Image (cartoon, rainbow, N blue to C red):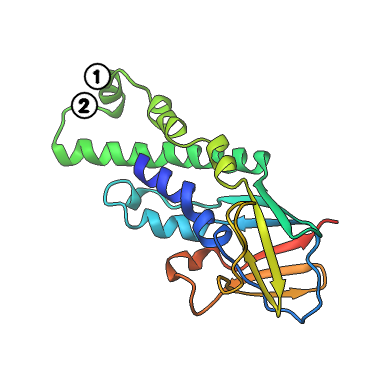
Amino acid sequence: MKKFLSLALGALLLVALLAGCGGGSAAGDSIVGSWSADVNMTEYLNQLLGEEEEIGQYLTLDNFTIKLLAEFKEDGTYSMNGDPDSAQAAMDGLKEQMKTAVTAYLEDMIEQEGLDMSLEDLLAASGMSLDDLVNEMDEAYSAEDLVGDLTMEGKYLFEDGKLALSDSLDEEADIEAYEAAELKGDTLTLTGGDDSDSEFAGLYPVVFERVS
């Protein structure tokens, strides 16, 4: 479970969205300004959960959405970060669903092993409560960790309908590293593309709205 949380939440947006993303708009359109997107990770995380042999069959997320904030400046630099409140709400919701999933998992384990004890007996014998078990998740990967992984800055290029982002201010953006998107007025929609990794298809579309 710790492996799932650290890999899935720690890397998914960095790889899918921040390492390189693209645009498909008319030349001359400007993305300078502040933007906000509600990134729905639910389908993506449920796909990863389906690959978990133990807990995956017991846990299907109802909703896991993070607000991603971005600012593109006239000097060709940008910054992005995850909204702390939305990250905390998403992680709190996950922990509540984890309690239900862990309960079902442990009850099935007791039955399959033919143990003559209740779930309460098992937890008492382990010296841990259900909350203790689920709270281990927060130690492995917290809302603060998620916000940290979504915080970055670098340089960007937006030309010929393509948006490219570098990973730091010391690196130039590579216009060849992009994915399909569409800019219409104050809406920038990232939709992936033929060269995008299908593993991250569950993240699209990601719709940014211009804030200012």
**Residue 128 quadrant:** top left
For mark 2, give the secondary structure.
Answer: loop
Q: Position of residue 159 (x, y in %)?
A: 71, 75
Q: Position of residue 91 (x, y in %)?
A: 54, 40
Q: Residues within 10 Å of mark 2 (few under 14, many from 20)?
A: few
How many badges with numbers are in the image?
2
Residue carrying label 2: 117
Do the CB atoms of the residues marked 2 and 1 lie less than 8 Å apart? yes
> Which quadrant does the C terminus fall into?
bottom right
> Which quadrant does the N terminus fall into?
top left
**Residue 71 quadrant:** bottom right
- Residue 1 visible (yes or no): no
Q: Nearer the viewer, residue 202 or 27?
A: 27
Q: Residue at x 41, y 60 (%)?
A: 47
Q: Residue at x 55, y 45 (%)?
A: 149
| Nearest to N terminus: mark 2 or mark 1 | 2
Q: Residues within 10 Å of mark 1 (few under 14, many from 20)?
A: few
Of the numbered discs in the image, which one, if any, rests on residue 9? Answer: none
Q: Relative to residue 148, is residue 59 drawn left or right?
A: left
Dot 2 amino acid type: Met
Q: Residue at x 69, y 57 (%)?
A: 37
Q: Residue at x 81, y 60 (%)?
A: 74
For mark 1, give the secondary structure.
Answer: helix
Residue carrying label 1: 125
Dot 1 amino acid type: Ala
**Residue 87 quadrant:** top right
Q: Residue furthest right?
A: 212
